[in-house]
Amino acid sequence: MEKISYELPDVLIAEHPASPRDASRLLVSIPPPSSSFHSFVRTRAKLLAPKRLNDSYADLKFSDLDRILPHDAHLVFNQSKVIPARMFASRASSQEPGVFEVMFLSSEEYNMTEAMQQPDCDGMLWRCMIRHPEISVGDNLSVKEDSSGKQLSLEVVHIHSQWKEEEGDGVEASVKIVRPNAGSEQHLSVESAFRIFGNVPLPPYMKRQVEKTDGEAYQTVFASLPGSVAAPTAGLHMTDELRQRLLKMGVKISLINLHVGAGTFRPVTAQTISQHTMHSEYFSVSQEEVRDLIRSLKLERPIVPVGTTTVRVLESLYWLGVLHEQSKSAERSSKTFSLGQWEAYQVAASTDNLPTPTAALESLAEAGNTIEGVTSLCIVPGYQFRLCDGLITNFHQTHSTLLLLVQALLQTPGLCDDMYRHAIDQRYRFLSYGDACFIANAHSHANKSEQPASTEPNSSAYSPGGVETPMRALSTQLDPGTKVLLHSCCAPCSGAMIEQMVEEGQEVTILFYNPNIHPREEYDVRKDENKRYADQLNIPFVDLDYDDVDEWYRRARGMEFSPERGARCTMCFDMRFERTALYAHEHGFPYITTTNATSRWKDAEQVDSSGIRAAAKYPGVEWWCRDWQTEAMSQRKYNINAEQSFYKQEYCGCTYSLRDSNEWRKKEGLERIKIADGNNVYSDAEKDAEEESLEVVAQFFAHTVSDEQERKRKLRETYGTRKKDAKSAAKNNW
């Protein structure tokens, strides 16, 4: 199948793991800003990789994971433990030299968790891959343990199919374990049989002998339930130290179980994927973990499975919940569950209104204390993910169903090929012991931005600059009682934001630091309005000085004609947020954020990028990103503005935004802005929202961009000779 093939140089196949584990590399596929989760990852990736080759990928370390994920992320790991499932046998009746591989795939009588607990292996039936093309029913295979001379016999009782692999062909067969001296009182447990006769089942593409260190290296730090014949390799990168950092920052970590079968390595050889038989794997999830997933869905926490096996479990849970809800059968809920290869697609096609992920899991949680069963779910392009907002996974083999899953998550045709080309060009290490990648679901359900209602533009509206972008920063849930230092630019942008924080129980302190605002009269009016509202709500108000005006102009030098949302705005955010972060660091505030995030005139990604940079300068300070521009929040803002009769400022704040806004108003035939006009207040919420609609914002931005060169020509001479008046410095910044 051409769509899941690529050329991988042998030198890029990792033969040994990185040391320490999280020193492995992490390729972040930078998502478009289509949801708040995407926007957070996008902003962090760009900050952590400033010298990246392009805007599509960021080349990081796995140890950066706690800097890429938002605080409210929900990571899900596979806790299955690899068993020494590979044995080497010879045919008892044959004189042929050497031994061949017998790979134990699954028990034919028990699920793998139960099978590994059996006290006696004698007589047990197992599905195996025997790497020998001439094996027949009735053959007896002899497995010896070199150091002790102990022996185990395997009787071939059924041949299921041919097994074709690049490393050597064989058969998939059922074998019965025949323990010598089975009549003796001493039993040989299944766990002991594998420990004595088995070897760590390193994938054959490593082309090396098992080493002593593989016993630990080929297990994740979460491994606890024996039963896998291949490692859930994405989890191999996690360390205890990184796990503690993630937990400390608020990330939720859940553990599910899926015993990985060797079928995960089996290539797709059929002409079409519909002709490929997907392997079945046993899984189990506690009711408690299901309820944790439900809570995360309700809180819109982004759910990020680590590894394709974890994705398979989560998505299977959704469809089993759908089936359970449809059946409402006590008989079904008392048994283990099973999901066929294409059953999810059939259910989707035959059901008019599928339940939400929350509803499906709530139904499934009623089934018992443990949800367990087998899944054959095959995820291919076109599949709609229900419980996967992102994925951490390794780079997979060519012609594998795992590549199809990655393609399905990326959605865009050719994007998977492009990502793998980048990984090869940048010399990433591939496959089980290789590096990892982070992919965001193209249609993430977490923190999805609400689309503001459309309104007709009002030509009488003012416009202080900037244009709304569709991206938003990540919504994080802070615990009640959390101290937040809120940088405030003005009262109108503060109202709904402060109200929401107070309702959620955060301990809010307002910090007013805006040396950009010109002139001083305007600055004082905006500050006084902000303090009035803070006093009304009994919220502490920190008034930092206005003495940094000279520093602001020094930093703005050379950017006088930078357009709104350009370099000058970035400088302005950086300066104000750095001062906010310093105050937070000095006074014990763990979180900072800004009311600039509520404004439709601002580029949210630009605001959040500056905030994240500022917070990173001071230990113990984090930037709180959240979507403050939802339609509901925006409407509440205008209602509060009208109720409070807040002063209605007509431009962003600095002298250059005043200039640009007046230029725009002149084109529209409007009067020039009246500075600190106390009669200009918010009074009509509906009209105010209309005057600041997305269409009006876009209209202003289109004018300012198209006229920029002409404006530069006309104004350069004027501003080139303008001087600061020292006598009025105490009152105005010019």
Image (tube, rainbow, N blue to C red):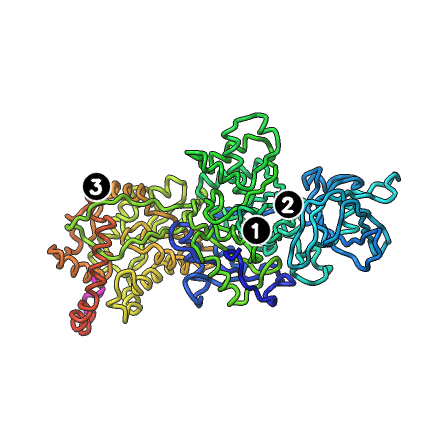
Choose the circle earlier in sequence order: 2 or 3.
Answer: 2
SS class of the residue under badge 2? loop
Local crowd size for mark 1, using a 10 Å CA cut-off: few (<14), some (14–19), many (≥20): few
Q: Nearer the viewer, mark 3 or mark 1?
A: 1
| Looking at the image, residue 294 lies above or below residue 197 | above
Q: Which mark is residue 270?
A: 1
The secondary structure making up most of the magenta span is: loop
> Marks 2 and 3, Cα distance to the nearest angstrom?
57 Å
- Left or right: 299, with 520 as reference point: right
SS class of the residue under badge 3? helix
Q: Is residue 617 visible?
A: no
* Residue 391 x %, y %: 51, 51
* Residue that mark 3 sits on: 686
Local crowd size for mark 2, using a 10 Å CA cut-off: few (<14), some (14–19), many (≥20): many
Q: Which residues are magenta?
A: 725-734
Q: Nearer the viewer, mark 1 or mark 2?
A: 1
Give the amino acid type for the residue marked by disc 3 in the picture: Glu
Give the amino acid type for the residue marked by disc 2 in the picture: His
Residue at x 45% of width, y 57% of height: 415
Give the amino acid type for the residue marked by disc 1 in the picture: Ala
> Marks 3 and 1, Cα distance to the nearest angstrom?
61 Å
Q: Nearer the viewer, mark 2 or mark 3?
A: 2
- The one nearer the camera, 163 or 543, is 163
Q: Looking at the image, how many numbered discs can be counted on the residues? A: 3
* Residue 324 x %, y %: 53, 31
Q: Quadrant of residue 52?
A: bottom left
Choose the circle earlier in sequence order: 3 or 1.
Answer: 1
| Looking at the image, residue 369 lies above or below residue 629 | above
Q: Is residue 512 magenta?
A: no
> Marks 1 and 2, Cα distance to the nearest angstrom?
25 Å
